[in-house]
Amino acid sequence: MQNWEEVMENYLEVVHRAKHGDAKAFADLYREVYEDLYRFAIYTLKNSADAQDVVSDTVMDAFSSIRKLRSEEAFRGWIFRILSNKCKKKLKEYVNKSAPLPEELPQQLITQEGLVDSAEHLQVRMLFWDLPQEDRMIIAMHLFAGYTSKETASLLRMNENTVRSRESRALKKMREKLMEEL
């Protein structure tokens, strides 16, 4: 059984190979990150077809621009930023449509005990996208992709306590703004 250092070293080697044009290495990375990407997209968009589309677009963009990746350690955060931007663009399309919007974001983003009605969920999404990108990443990685604070801190190269406090402050800020708007 491999220890953590060996696993990380192997992972970084795969990213390095993908960065230098190895399509099989990129496919290996894709298989490893696909579920998390899809989970993030489906929780953000609440539409399976759109989630599949943005994940597909994300993977295509990542594949075509992986040579620009500065650091192998940053791969997961980098591909999630691409996905986050694609989801934001898709959410803006929802706003411009006359069709009903997808269901609300997870309850954890809004209140600790209350439910959000359908008129409020667009406000919640907009508040989410108004947060700084790093705060959105922290919230998304925890709530949508299921990462722990420790895993998020490692991926974003931050202190674990910083991750927890930034998430807590961002969620509190969203709650307060939502209450002001209601």
Image (tube, rainbow, N blue to C red):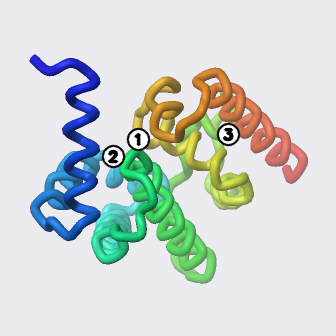
Between circles 3 and 1, the one closer to the viewer is 1
Q: Indicate the quadrant containing the N terminus: top left, top right, bottom left or bottom right.
A: top left
Q: Please report contact status of discs 1 and 2: CB closer than 8 Å, yes or no.
A: yes
Q: Amino acid at mark 3?
A: Ile
Q: Position of residue 12 (x, y in %)?
A: 28, 44
Judge from the rendering whether residue 32 lies leftward or rightward of residue 127; answer left or right.
Answer: left
Residue 105 appears left or right of 20: right
Which label sits in the foreground, 2 or 3? 2
Q: Secondary structure at mark 2?
A: helix
* C-alpha span from label 1 to label 2: 5 Å
Residue matched to label 3: 110
Residue 120 position within the rendered picture, expressed as x and y whole percent measured from the top left? 70, 54
- Could you say which is closer to the camera, residue 145 or residue 49? 145
Q: Is residue 2 left or right of residue 77?
A: left
CA separation in Å, label 2 and label 3: 22 Å
Residue 20, x across and y down, in percent: 24, 66
Return the residue at label 1.
Answer: 145
Q: Residue at horizontal 49%, vertical 55%?
A: 44
Task: Say which residue appears at 43% left-offset and 53% top-offset.
Answer: 71
Q: Which label belongs to residue 36? A: 2
Marks 3/1 in contact by CB < 8 Å: the verdict is no
Between 36 and 44, the residue placed more toward the observer is 36
Q: Amino acid at mark 1?
A: Ala
